[in-house]
Image (cartoon, rainbow, N blue to C red):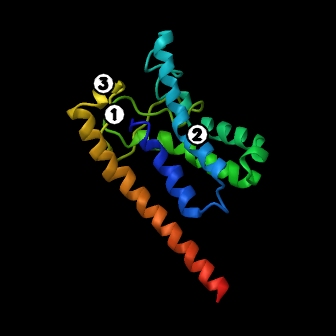
Amino acid sequence: MPTVLSHAAVPLALGLGLGGKVIPGRLLLAGVAASILPDLDVVAFKFHIAYADVFGHRGASHSLLFAVCVALLAVACVRYLKASRWSAFVFVAVSAASHGILDSLTNGGLGPALWWPFSSGRVFAPWQVIEVSPLTLQRIFSARGWAVLQSELFWIWLPALHVCAGLILLRHCAFNRSAG
């Protein structure tokens, strides 16, 4: 898995790139939370639930169905999020789904159960380019953790920055066209 902070890159890039009129601040925060939420499954270790179990780490909470369920919860909160139902659903679904997709790009651990409950199989993307993150803070602040952060900067944050900049550019071009 990428570090918990790097999971936030997708909603931040999309939300900041699309701007506050499309993705209000509260919805942006909900997207960031949704992108991090699947990793709360590490609590399963405290209950002696095995990593490979369907409710273990990278299991059901990393599925696309889980992302849809989180998005439906966002729809129920649209008044608080100050967003339309459609934007809340799509933004939160994409944010939550990005977690499992990013995890499938890592080079270690078990792949995420993206297709649960239809399949409990763990999957990896054809390219596993992101260094897998250690699960403990102590190991994150080590030489191995530094290698993970460098990998995430290149494979997650740099592309996210490009997406954000591209969306901002498109937004400004559209504004200038409508103003002219």
Kindly check if marks 1 and 2 are in contact, taking CB atoms under 8 A apart as contact: no
Q: Which amino acid is tagged 2?
A: Ala
In the depicted view, which residue is nearer to us: 134 or 65? 134
Q: Which mark is residue 149?
A: none
Q: Which amino acid is tagged 3?
A: Gln
Query: Which type of secondary structure does the marked residue at label 1 adopt?
Result: loop
- In the rendered image, the quadrant that contains the N terminus is top left
Q: Which amino acid is tagged 1?
A: Ser
Q: Specify few, some or many for label 2: CA neighbours under 10 Å numbering under 14, 14-19, or 20 or more.
A: many
Identified at 46% across, 42% down, the residue is 7
Q: Specify few, some or many for label 1: CA neighbours under 10 Å numbering under 14, 14-19, or 20 or more.
A: many
Identified at 70% across, 42% down, the residue is 74
In the depicted view, which residue is nearer to us: 73 or 67? 73
Query: Which type of secondary structure does the marked residue at label 3 adopt?
Result: helix
Mark 1 → mark 2, Cα distance in angstroms: 19 Å
Across and down, in percent, residue 20 comes to 63, 60
In the depicted view, which residue is nearer to us: 20 or 10? 20
| Residue named by callout 2 | 34
Query: Which quadrant of the figure has residue 18?
Result: bottom right
Mark 3 → mark 1, Cα distance in angstroms: 12 Å
Identified at 65% across, 37% down, the residue is 70
Q: Which mark is residue 133?
A: 1
Mark 3 → mark 2, Cα distance in angstroms: 25 Å
Decide if residue 86 is on the left or right side of residue 40.
right
| Residue named by callout 3 | 138
Across and down, in percent, residue 8 comes to 48, 45
Decide if residue 166 is on the left or right side of residue 137.
right
Query: Which type of secondary structure does the marked residue at label 2 adopt?
Result: helix
Across and down, in percent, residue 139 comes to 28, 26
